[in-house]
Image (cartoon, rainbow, N blue to C red):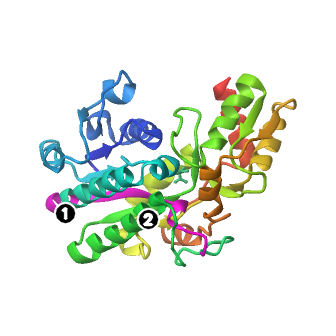
Amino acid sequence: MKRILITGALGQIGSELTLSLRETYGKDKVIATDIRKPDHEVATEGPFEILDVMDQKRMSQLVSTHRVDTIIHLAALLSAKAELNPLFAWNLNMSGLLNVLETAKEFKTKFFAPSSIGAFGPTTPKNATPQNTIQRPTTMYGINKLTGELLADYYFRRYGVDCRGLRFPGLISYKTQPGGGTTDYAVEMYHEAVKHRRYTSYIKKGTYLDMMYMPDALAAIIQLMEADGTQLKNRNAYNVTAMSLDPEKLAQSIRREIPEFRLDYKIDSVRQQIADSWPNQLDASCAKEEWGFKPTFTLDRMTKEMIKNIM
Ligand code: AKB
């Protein structure tokens, strides 16, 4: 990767990935794009361009002008938001993705897009979910993610576009709030624990989902994108995870730092149904074997860092 363009650079992954890539590859080598330009260091401390991913002409112009060799496509609606407006989600998530794939084909760039545990469904094996298994998602977000995986495979096989992807679990970070996802409760719980010593979870006790701390997610993106392409058998997209949590397990870890923390429940049926359709715990062995994926944060280490930084 020499000159990287990121879509959705102001989102949860984008805002941290942009800064991390600028540190590694140089400030002027990472072109952040989003549909708005706020007063944020992503937009003020390096190249930034306004880009609506529905506008393929402008995307091509930017890739050409900045001589981009890698596109990291992060602009998308998350699961809970997509379920509230499925048609809008399909249009944004799928047209945006196709525009990026077409641009990558035209300019022969590398391509990365995140898939998700949402690409699985209720008939997928719930535990040690294999890399290659049943995928019949029941949410619009999951349908978008699975279609994205298949399209990226197609562009690789048919046009030779160097497409790569990861199936991300819930990502936890103290820097940027996610917004619109089902796994957001984990991030909210840390913030509320620090501010109010209590949290009301919209996800039921006993609902296990995969999670990962953001620094491990950023390292995984860079490691996959720098990996030798000839070693990649499952390009789009690799299962990755660092831990499997339910709200109680997360609360227990928080109580080791804040003993008086109290967890209550008020279940949101939309997000609970989405969570129930997802696996409990992925098997990430293909990512480990093919390009050396190795998360470093355990639950308690992540909790310590989250609480220290939110305080
Ligand atoms: C969401 O909850 O929608 C995302 C995801 C797991 O893809 N965090």
Residue 147, percent from left and from top = 38, 67
Mark toward the viewer: 1 or 2: 2
Residue 226, percent from left and from top = 38, 58
Q: Residue furthest toward the right?
A: 259
164 horizontally vs 118: left or right: left
From the image, tell me which residue sits under label 1: 105
Which region is colored magenta? 104-123
Amino acid type at mark 2? Ile
Residue 240, percent from left and from top = 56, 61
Residue at horizontal 46%, vertical 38%?
16
Vertical arrangement, residue 284 with respect to residue 193, above or below: below
From the image, tell me which residue sits under label 2: 143
Report if residue 112 lies within the magenta region.
Answer: yes
Mark 1 Cα shell of 10 Å, populated few (<14), some (14-19), many (≥20)? some
Residue at horizontal 30%, vertical 27%?
37
Mark 1 to mark 2 CA distance (whole Å)? 23 Å
Residue at horizontal 19%, vertical 63%?
105
